[in-house]
Amino acid sequence: MTRSEIELVFTINFLAFREIDENSLHNHSEFPTSDEILQFLATDTGNLDRQSIIARYKELTGPDHHKLFALPGERRLVEKVFTPLRHAIGSYMLKNYLGAIALCGSVCEMLAIFTHQLHLYRLGEAATTDEQQKLLYGSTFERLGQDRRVAVLKALNLIDDEVAKMFNLPKEIRNNYLHWFSRPTDKISQDAIVAWRATRDLTLRTFKIGIEDGRLTIDRTLAEYLSTMIASQEK
């Protein structure tokens, strides 16, 4: 094949926010409209009307969403777990299914690390040090891969097979889309729902927050640990 016989197709300005770039080029101060911003943020520009966005919120969260009504306000948990969970919802609403899946995978990693930290808190003076963890696990727990983290949690009887599945499902879905170039993406919206709901259920199992007789209930050791975390940040 000669050079003249090669045909290529290019997508032009795919990464450009045209309304901003053109205004800057011509020294205009006009701001993009809300619709133009939404069009740029969305992965797919179809079905971005208000009704469709609301419908996707309801489609993702489902009837059990109210169970997440009260979550600990500790700063690191808000930053590492609950804010990414909220952004996962927003990503799905804008049809950014890949973003939703990636965020769910990240949240599951944070939940694994938090579960192990809570375990160390329960052990008190008997808790393993970083050096002991390196001898036992090959590195500190936080630096392990997620597969190894889940295996360690299971070996310590901190999680059962059902919870291990909750940890593994979002990771497997994320790996299909973020680590395999050859895998198809035709079911990505359904996979995003599966990943988010598994992550939600895992969050509920991790924090064990509920309502009894009209009162908020939480595991006592967890409450003590959260109070300790908050107190350490205030020093």
Image: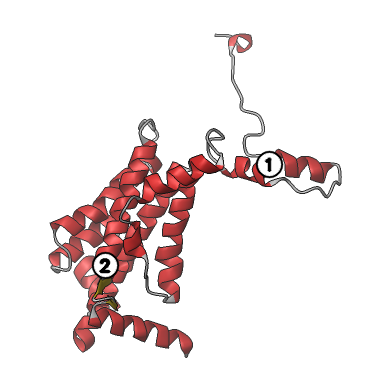
Residue hosting label 1: 17
Is the residue under label 2 in contact with that under label 1 (CB below 8 Å)?
no
Which mark, residue 206?
2
Residue 140 seen in this snapshot? no
| Above or below: residue 235 compared with residue 189 | below
Name which quarter of the figure residue 9 lies in.
Answer: top right
| Above or below: residue 133 compared with residue 200 | below
Mark 1 neighbour density, 10 Å: few (under 14) some (14–19) many (20 or more): some
Q: What residue type is labelled 2?
A: Thr
- Closer mark to the observer between disc 1 and disc 2: 2
Residue drawn at x 41%, y 58% is: 85
Q: Where the N terminus falls, by quadrant?
A: top right
Q: What percent of the width, then of the height, locates residue 145?
A: 30, 58
**Side of 180 where 52 appears, left or right:** right
Mark 2 secondary-structure assignment:
helix
| Above or below: residue 41 compared with residue 134 | above
Mark 1 secondary-structure assignment:
loop
Name which quarter of the figure residue 222 lies in.
Answer: bottom left
Q: What residue type is labelled 1?
A: Phe
Is 158 or 85 nearer to us in this picture? 85
